[in-house]
Image (tube, rainbow, N blue to C red):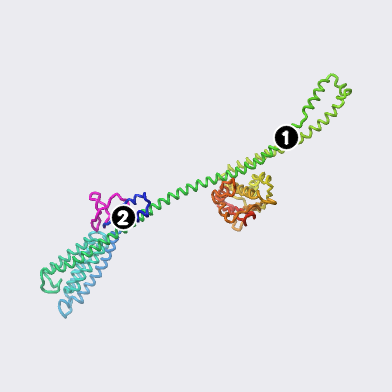
C-alpha cells in the first residue's frame, strides 16, 4: 500500500510521508496513549501526525458507523421474524412436545407471545430510534441469545434448536465488534447454567442432567467465538486497508485538482499575456504598414527635393549678376551704352533669352513643390488615420464597411503602387458594422499586407481582389484574394499558429493575432488555397451587430 501511495501522489506531498498500512479497527487518535481506539476495540498505534492516517481514520469511522446502523436495522427485521416463528413453534410444536399427543393452548404459547414480545420490542425500538449506538448492539446481542433460549425452551430443549445460538453468533459477527460476541457468550453461558441447574428439561430436554453440562455447550460457543474473532479481525483489517486506499485516492485527487487549478490559472495568465502580445503585435503590424507606406512616400519626397535642388543649381545667377554690374558701370550714360555700345545693343536680347531660360526650371520646381506638398499631405493623412484608429481601440461603434476597406487599402496604397499590384473591389450593399474599428483594421491591413507579399514573386499581372458581402447566415464576409504564391496544404491550419511564418523577416504574430481578434469580435478568420502557385483566399466573417 505504501507503494501505491508513493506512485499515486507526488513525492513532496505530505500524504506520502505516512507510514505503512493501518492495522486496526478504528482510526480515532489518542495523543496520550498513542493508540487507535474505536467502537470496535483498540489496536496497535500509528503516528498521529499523518494527514493521510487522520483522513483514513475518518473514513474508517464512517464505514464502521454505517455498518453498525445497517446491522441494527437487519436485526430489527430478524427479531420480528423470530418472534413470529416462536409463536408458531409454541402453537404447533410446544404443546405436543410438553403434553404428548394432546394439543391445546399451552402456557408456553403465552410465553412466546408475551415474553417473546418483551424480548423483541425494546431492541427493535432501539434499532429504529438509536441505530449505530454501542448500547443498541449490546442490547440486541442480549435479546438475540434470549430469543434463542426461548426457542430452545419452546421446542423442549431439542438439540436442533441449539444451532440457533450458533447462527445468532454468526449474525452478531456482522457488527465486526468482538465485544458484542463476548456479551452474547456471557448471556448464553449464564442461561445454560441457571436453567441447567433449575430446569434442565427446558434447555437440555431431559429431567435430570449433570451440573457441568452447561460447560460443554459453553465450550462449543467459545470455539465458534474464536473462529469469529479471527474473521472479525481480518475484516477490520480489510476495512482499514480500504479506508487508507480511499484516503490515498482522495489525497491524490486533491493534489491533482490543486495542480489543475494552478495550471489553469497559469494557462489563463499565459493566455491573457498572449492576447496582449498578439494585440500589441497586431498594432505593430498596422504601424509597420503605416511606416512602410510613409517610407515609400518619403522616397518620393526625397526625389522631388533632389530634383528641385538640381533645378535651382541650373539657375544662371552669375550671368544675371554680370549684367547688373555692367548696367551699374554705365549708369551715367546708360542710353548711349544701350544704343551705341555693341555690348549694350546685345543686352536686351540676352535678358530675354535669360528670362526664358529661368522660366523653365522655375516651372519644374513649382511642379516638384506641388508633388512634394501632395506627398506630405499623404503622410499626414496616413498618420492621422493611424492615430484615429489607435484612439478607437476597444470602442464598439457603427461603421461603414466600405470605408473600412478603403482605409485599409489606402494605408497600403503606396506599397501597392510601388509593386504594381492591381487592387479591385467588389463591395455589395451591407448594413453598417457594429464592432471595434481598430481590431477590424488590424486584421484587414495584415491580410492586405500578406497578399502583397504573396504577389512579390508573382510573374505576370499581380492581382488582388477585396470582396464584401453578407452570407446566408446573416454574417458579414470580407474576402481578400490574390493570385500569388499560394499556401501548401500542410500549412493551411499552421499559418494561424503563434510564431509560425514563412517570411524571412516575419514574426508569426500577424495571422495569429488576427484570428484571435476575429474570435474576440464573435467571428472567424479562415484561409483557403488550391496549392503552391495558385493564390490564396482569406475570409473574415463578422457578426453585423456585436
Local secondary structure at mark 2: helix
User: Camera-side residue: 407 or 227?
Assistant: 227
- Pointer 1: what residue? 308
- The mark closer to the camera, 2 or 1, is 1
Q: Does 51 appear in magenta?
A: yes
Q: Tell me: 140 left or right of 9.
A: left
**Distance between the alpha carbons at the discs numbered 2 and 1:** 93 Å
Question: Does 493 sit left or right of 184 as displayed?
Answer: right
Q: Is the N terminus in the top left, top right, bottom left or bottom right quadrant?
A: bottom left
The numbered disc on residue 56 is 2
Image quadrant assignment for residue 219: bottom left
Badge 2 vs badge 1, beta-carbon distance below 8 Å: no
Question: Looking at the picture, does residue 94 appear above or below residue 463?
Answer: below
Where residue 437 appears, as percent x and y from the top left, is 59, 46
Of residue 480 and residue 457, the one placed in the foreground of this image is 457
Magenta region: which residues?
A: 25-54
Judging depth in this view, the residue of 502 and 260 nearest the camera is 502
Q: Where is residue 291 in the image (x, y as percent from the top left)?
A: 62, 41
Which disc, if any, is residue 432? none
Q: Does the magenta stretch include residue 131?
A: no
Amino acid at each position: 500500500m505504501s507503494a501505491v501511495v508513493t506512485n499515486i501522489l507526488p513525492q513532496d506531498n505530505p500524504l506520502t510521508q505516512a507510514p505503512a498500512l493501518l492495522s486496526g479497527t478504528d482510526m480515532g487518535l489518542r495523543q496520550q496513549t498513542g493508540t487507535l481506539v474505536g467502537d470496535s476495540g483498540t489496536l496497535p498505534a500509528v503516528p498521529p501526525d499523518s494527514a493521510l492516517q487522520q483522513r483514513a481514520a475518518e473514513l474508517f469511522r464512517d464505514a464502521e458507523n454505517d455498518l453498525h446502523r445497517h446491522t441494527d436495522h437487519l436485526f430489527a427485521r430478524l427479531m420480528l421474524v423470530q418472534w413470529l416463528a416462536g409463536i408458531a413453534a409454541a402453537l404447533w410444536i410446544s404443546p405436543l412436545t410438553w403434553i404428548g399427543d394432546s394439543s391445546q393452548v399451552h402456557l408456553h404459547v403465552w410465553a412466546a407471545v408475551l415474553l417473546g414480545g418483551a424480548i423483541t420490542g425494546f431492541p427493535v425500538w432501539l434499532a429504529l430510534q438509536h441505530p449505530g449506538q454501542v448500547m443498541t448492539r449490546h442490547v440486541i446481542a442480549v435479546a438475540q441469545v434470549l430469543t434463542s433460549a426461548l426457542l430452545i425452551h419452546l421446542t423442549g430443549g431439542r438439540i436442533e434448536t441449539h444451532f440457533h445460538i450458533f447462527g445468532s453468533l454468526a449474525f452478531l459477527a456482522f457488527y465486526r465488534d468482538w465485544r458484542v460476541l463476548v456479551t452474547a457468550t456471557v448471556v448464553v453461558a449464564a442461561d445454560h447454567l441457571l436453567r441447567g441447574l433449575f430446569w434442565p428439561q427446558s434447555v437440555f430436554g431431559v429431567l435430570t442432567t449433570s451440573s457441568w453440562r452447561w460447560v460443554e455447550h459453553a465450550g462449543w460457543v467459545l470455539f465458534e467465538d474464536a473462529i469469529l474473532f479471527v474473521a472479525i479481525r481480518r475484516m477490520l483489517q480489510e476495512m482499514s486497508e480500504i479506508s487508507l486506499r480511499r484516503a490515498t485516492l482522495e489525497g491524490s485527487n486533491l493534489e491533482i485538482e490543486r495542480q489543475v487549478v494552478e495550471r489553469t490559472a497559469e494557462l489563463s495568465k499565459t493566455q491573457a499575456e498572449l492576447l496582449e502580445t498578439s494585440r500589441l503585435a497586431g498594432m505593430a503590424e498596422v504601424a509597420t504598414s503605416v511606416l512602410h507606406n510613409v517610407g515609400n512616400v518619403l522616397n518620393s519626397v526625397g526625389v522631388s527635393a533632389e530634383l528641385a535642388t538640381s533645378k535651382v543649381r541650373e539657375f544662371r545667377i552669375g550671368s544675371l549678376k554680370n549684367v547688373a554690374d555692367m548696367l551699374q558701370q554705365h549708369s551715367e550714360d546708360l542710353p548711349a551704352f544701350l544704343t551705341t555700345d555693341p555690348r549694350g545693343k546685345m543686352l536686351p536680347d540676352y535678358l530675354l533669352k535669360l528670362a526664358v531660360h529661368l522660366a523653365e526650371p522655375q516651372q519644374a520646381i513649382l511642379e516638384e513643390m506641388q508633388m512634394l506638398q501632395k506627398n506630405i499631405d499623404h503622410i499626414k493623412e496616413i498618420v492621422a488615420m493611424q492615430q484615429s484608429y489607435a484612439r478607437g481601440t476597444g470602442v464598439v461603434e457603427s461603421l461603414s464597411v466600405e470605408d473600412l476597406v478603403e482605409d485599409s487599402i489606402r494605408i497600403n496604397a503606396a506599397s501597392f503602387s510601388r509593386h504594381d499590384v492591381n487592387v479591385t473591389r467588389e463591395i455589395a450593399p451591407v448594413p453598417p458594422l457594429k464592432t471595434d474599428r481598430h481590431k477590424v483594421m488590424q486584421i484587414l491591413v495584415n491580410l492586405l499586407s500578406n497578399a502583397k507579399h504573396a504577389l512579390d514573386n508573382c510573374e505576370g499581372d499581380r492581382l488582388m481582389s477585396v470582396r464584401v458581402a453578407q452570407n446566408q447566415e446573416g454574417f458579414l464576409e470580407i474576402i481578400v484574394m490574390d493570385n500569388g504564391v499560394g499556401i501548401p496544404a500542410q500549412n493551411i491550419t499552421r499559418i494561424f499558429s503563434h510564431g509560425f511564418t514563412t517570411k524571412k523577416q516575419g514574426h508569426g504574430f500577424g495571422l495569429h493575432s488576427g484570428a484571435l481578434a476575429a474570435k474576440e469580435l464573435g467571428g472567424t478568420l479562415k484561409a483557403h488555397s488550391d496549392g503552391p502557385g495558385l493564390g490564396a483566399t482569406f475570409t473574415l466573417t463578422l457578426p453585423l451587430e456585436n
